[in-house]
């Protein structure tokens, strides 16, 4: 089975949909907030960087900072749960 040019064009357009949706979702967000949102997706650092107009290294660094911050928050929550402190 062969594909014709219109099939190829359609496939190319479909492949761009996640980028377009991500751009729309993060349009007025700060870069950190946009990375935090897109971190929940399966997009690579390079793809997120392309969407946000930055570098993959910037995205990777921010994802690592977010992950460390999340671990710190989880440890505080676990400690509070163990002592019965709410908040």
Image (cartoon, grey):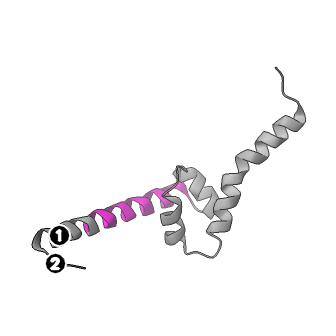
The magenta segment = 55-72
Expressed as whole percent of the image width and height from the top left, the position of residue 45 reads: 52, 52
> Residue at 12% of width from left, 68% of height from top?
82
> Residue at 63% of width from left, 76% of height from top?
28
Expressed as whole percent of the image width and height from the top left, the position of residue 32 reads: 49, 70
Above or below for 9 versus 3:
below
Q: How far apart are labels 1 and 2 at the CA level?
A: 6 Å
| Residue 71 lies in the magenta stretch | yes
Spot the residue most to the left: 83
Residue on which the image places disc 1: 81
Horizontal side, residue 33 vs residue 73: left or right: right
* Dot 1 and dot 2 residues touching (CB under 8 Å): yes
Residue on which the image places disc 2: 85
SS at circle 2? loop
Residue 20 is marked as: none
Horizontal side, residue 59 vs residue 52: left or right: left
Please count the marks in the image. Answer: 2
- Magenta span: chief secondary structure: helix
Q: Residues within 10 Å of mark 1 (few under 14, many from 20)?
A: few
25 or 32, nearer to the observer:
25
Horizontal side, residue 57 vs residue 51: left or right: left
> Residue at 48% of width from left, 65% of height from top?
36
Expressed as whole percent of the image width and height from the top left, the position of residue 34 reads: 54, 68
């Amino acid at each position: 089975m062969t594909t014709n040019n219109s099939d190829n064009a359609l496939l190319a357009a479909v492949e761009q949909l996640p980028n377009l949706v991500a751009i729309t979702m993060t349009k007025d967000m700060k870069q950190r907030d946009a990375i935090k949102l897109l971190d929940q997706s399966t997009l690579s650092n390079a793809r997120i960087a392309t969407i946000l107009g930055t570098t993959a290294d910037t995205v990777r660094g921010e994802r690592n900072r977010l992950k460390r911050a999340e671990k710190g928050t989880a440890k505080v929550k676990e400690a509070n749960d163990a002592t019965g402190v709410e908040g």
